[in-house]
Each structure stands twice: as structure tokens, then as C-alpha cells.
Amino acid sequence: MKKKYNLIIYIIFCLIFMTINILFLFNKMPHYITLEFNKTVRFILLMIMMLFEITFSSLVYILYKKKNAFEKLFLIVALSLGLLLLVLIPVGKVPDEYSHFGRAYDISMGNLMASEKGSDMPIEIATSVISEQEYGNYSEIIKKITTENSGQTSHYVFLNTAVYNFICYIPQTIGIIVGKVFNAPVLLDAYLGRITNFICWITLLYFSIKFIPFAKKYLILISLLPITLQEAVSLSPDALTFASCVFLISYTLYLANTKREFVIKDYVILSVMCIIVSLCKIVYMPVCLILFILPKEKFKSLKDKNIKILSLALIVITLNLSWLKIASGFLIETHPGVNPVLQKNWVLSHPFSYLKVLIMSIYTNYHFYLSSMMGQSLELLSVDVTGFYPKISLFGLIILTILDRFTDIFIKFKDKILFLFIVISIIVLIFTSLYIQWTPVKYPVVDGVQGRYFLPLLCLIPLIFYNSKKRLKTYDFNYLNIYVLVYSIFANLGAFIYIFAVNY
């Protein structure tokens, strides 16, 4: 009787969100979508959407009842949604993707360090990939992806992505090299780069969900937000950055809560991940401080722990300072009034004035940061998904954080202080880096900050609110994992409707 009751609740849950998506499809399209679907197109889309919804919600339930691990269920859902989104979003329709493709293609030619003078690359880099100033549709993509390369070259300079270390382009470069080996059209090279980038992302997230000792459903919801998936299936380094941060946090929490000793394999894994995280984007380097939560009992002695962690910290800092010295040569005036050198000097000499800038920026734009972090603004911030799903996602994260307080996992108060310090440090570094590189000198607010930059922090914020004591009575909320998964399916398909309408 209980099983039948649970199934009925699940079906009702699915029917509610299925109805919401139908209303999205048959509602009048937003003003930024010039195309109005006729009845035939809407009916076809309705059938396809319902087929996806029924198939995946049924599959998730069946696999859940067969006691499949949640990381396996995540893999199936994320792979299906990700590949669909990879096809729906044209290459170049993700922020800075045109420049990221140019940088990755340059690396595939053996140029690990970008040149201020640029490089000669196939002319199709510009003619096939949509730049941020252009619009394209699926018919154009099909035409370009089946057109052979002309063999002509053009000179390209991508200084805005030259500051990125080549490490964060390794997944994309692998796909591009495969395409070049088979002399594939340049646009197909880009899609292959997307695929290998996505494979890297989904592999790290799979093991993150497997290893993390608690908050699995919370991590699943973050990973399956439409904005997270958009970055995962793009050529952006944000995919590797997010996945690396999450894996480092997850694996460290796993080691801290397991009974086995810390072995050399663990040290190698953590070292590699710390180096990748810091070299992908230096603003996330404070995430590496999470290693200090590892109990001294995991090591031979307290001295052994300090030597291992501090030596790793020295390596990470040295590598980043070396790269900063190289990358500083690529800092340019992105638009009028921007001067990185003058801005940096002003921040250092007027710390309290800059603190006022930070507070004003957050106060003025907090709604945009939250909504864009939850996936309300997709593609080039040009697809404004209805606020329903972003609000539900934010509400869901809050609820899951509260419910996890009733588990038997507890976190020491000093570790919570460390998590809080990491979060604040990264927020300050994100704002400061964009204030120096992107914002006019002495401007009253920081320009260029987007909600997606805070996605890696979402894994740390709930830890600050976890238990500080063991509880006498605990509750099992693992059954909510299936609802998080199926909700993510409906939320993404709802967003996909708008993406398809823009690019149809």
C-alpha cells in the first residue's frame, strides 16, 4: 500500500510540472522572441517534450526502485539533458565562447602561450562560429557544419582569453584535435570540443556525487541547473572550473568523514585538483584551503599534515604568481575608461572606498546575481527564462539545506568558520578581478559580474549551516533525491523551449 501511495505522489508531482511546461509552450512567447510558432509546430514540440518527460521520469523512477546509486541516475539524466542542450545552443551563443574557441584552437596548433600578435587560423573560425554580435539559426548551422574547409587562413587575436592558462582548455583542445585529424569542418571541431569538455565535466561530477558523504541531492540540483548545464556543454573553461571545485570539495569531505588513513593516492589527487582549480581561475584558489579540515589523525602526525598541505600551498602559489606575471601582459583596455594598472593602484590605496564599491555593487545588483545564478538568463544573457523555475530552484536549495541539518552528519564550528572565510574570499576576489580588468577607473559599482561566477560557492554555503553537534535522532531524506532529479528534468525542458524558440 505504501509503495502504491509513493507512486501516486510521484505521478502527481510529474503531472504538475508537465502542465506548467505545456502552459509555457502555449503561452505567448516573450517580446525578445520574434518568431511565433504556428499550431502545427507547437503540437510537434508538445509531443516531443511530453515524450522526453514521460520517458525520463519513468526511467528515473524504475532505476530508483531498483536501488541504483544516485550518481548513476545523475549520469543518465545529465548526459541526456546535456547532449540535448549541446545541440540546441549554437556554438558562440554562450558568453565569450567565440573567443574561447579561438584560444582552444590556437592551443591545438601547439601554442600553449598566447601571443599578443595573434595567430593565423582557418578563416572559418569567424565565418562558421557565431560571434556575440551575430544571430544564427539551426538551418545555418546545418549548412556550415556540412561545408568543407576552404583552406584559407586569417589572422586572429584573442587577448580577452589569452589571460587564461592553457590547462583549462585541455578538454576542449582534445576534441578539436580529433576533428583536425579527420579534417572535419571547423564548426564540427567546435562541437567536438564541446563534447570532450562536457565529458570531462560529467566525469568529475559523477565522482563528486559518489564521494560526497552528504548533501548529494543538493549537489545534484546545483549541477543540473540550466545555467550550469549551459556552461558544461560549451567551450568555456567555466565547465572545468566548476567541476574541479566541486570535486575538490567533495573528495576532501569524503576523506574527512571516512575511517581510512590518508594515503599517497589521496595526496596526488588533491594536489592535481588544487593546481587545476587555481590555474583555471585564480579567484577560486581559496577553495584549496578546504584541505585544512582533514583531521590530523588521517596523517602520520600533525607535522606530517602541515608539511604536506603547506608544501602543496607553496606549489600552487608559485605556479599562480608565475602565470600572473605572464598574463599581466594581456590586460588591455576592454572599453573606454578601463585601465587595470590605475584601477589596481586605486584599490590598494583606497581600501575603504573600494569596500563601499563592493557593498554598493551587491546592494544594487543582488537580484540579478541571484536570478542569473539560478538560470533565468541563458545563452548571451539574451534568453530570459520565466522566473518560475529559477525561484523554485532557489527555494529548493534552501529547503534541502534545512533538511540536511536533521541528518547524523555534523561539522565542527572551526570548519564552518573556514568555509565562511573561503566563500567571502572568493566573492571579494571575483568582484576585485572584474573591477580591475573590466570596470572604468573609480566607477561606483563593479561591472561585468554574473551569477554563474558564484556557482562553485553553492557547494560550500550549506556547509556553514550544518550541524555542529551529533543528534540523538536523525531522519532519512534520501527519497528526495528522485524528486530533485525529476524536477531538474522538467526545469531544463522548460528552459529548452525558450532556447529552441530563439534559434528556430
Image (spheres, helix red, strand yellow):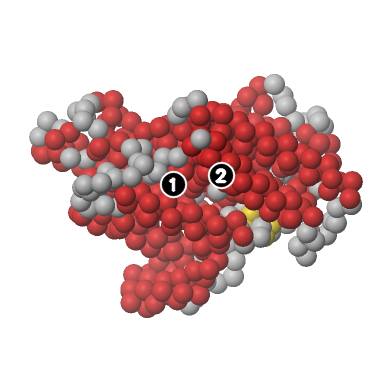
Residue kind at label 1, given as amino acid type: Tyr
Residue 222 placement, left or right of 498: left
Q: Nearer the viewer, residue 195 or 182?
A: 195
User: For the view shown, which residue lies furthest in the top direction?
Assistant: 182
Residue 454 marker: none
Distance between the alpha carbons at the discs numbered 2 and 1: 21 Å
Q: Nearer the viewer, residue 87 or 491?
A: 491
Q: Nearer the viewer, residue 292 or 24?
A: 24
Determine the secondary structure under disc 2.
helix
Q: Which residue is found at the position 33% from the left and 73% from the top? A: 351
Q: Which residue is found at the position 77% from the left and 39% from the top? A: 48
- Mark 2 = which residue? 9
User: Residue 176: x, y in percent?
Assistant: 62, 31
Classify 211 as above or below 14: above
Determine the secondary structure under disc 1.
helix
| Label 1 crowd bin: few (<14), some (14–19), many (20+), radius 10 Å | many
Residue kind at label 2, given as amino acid type: Ile
Residue 218 marker: 1
Residue 415 placement, left or right of 54: left
Q: Which residue is found at the position 46% from the left and 43% from the top? A: 480
Q: Is residue 362 visible?
A: yes
Q: Specify the quadrant of the image occupied by residue 250.
A: top left
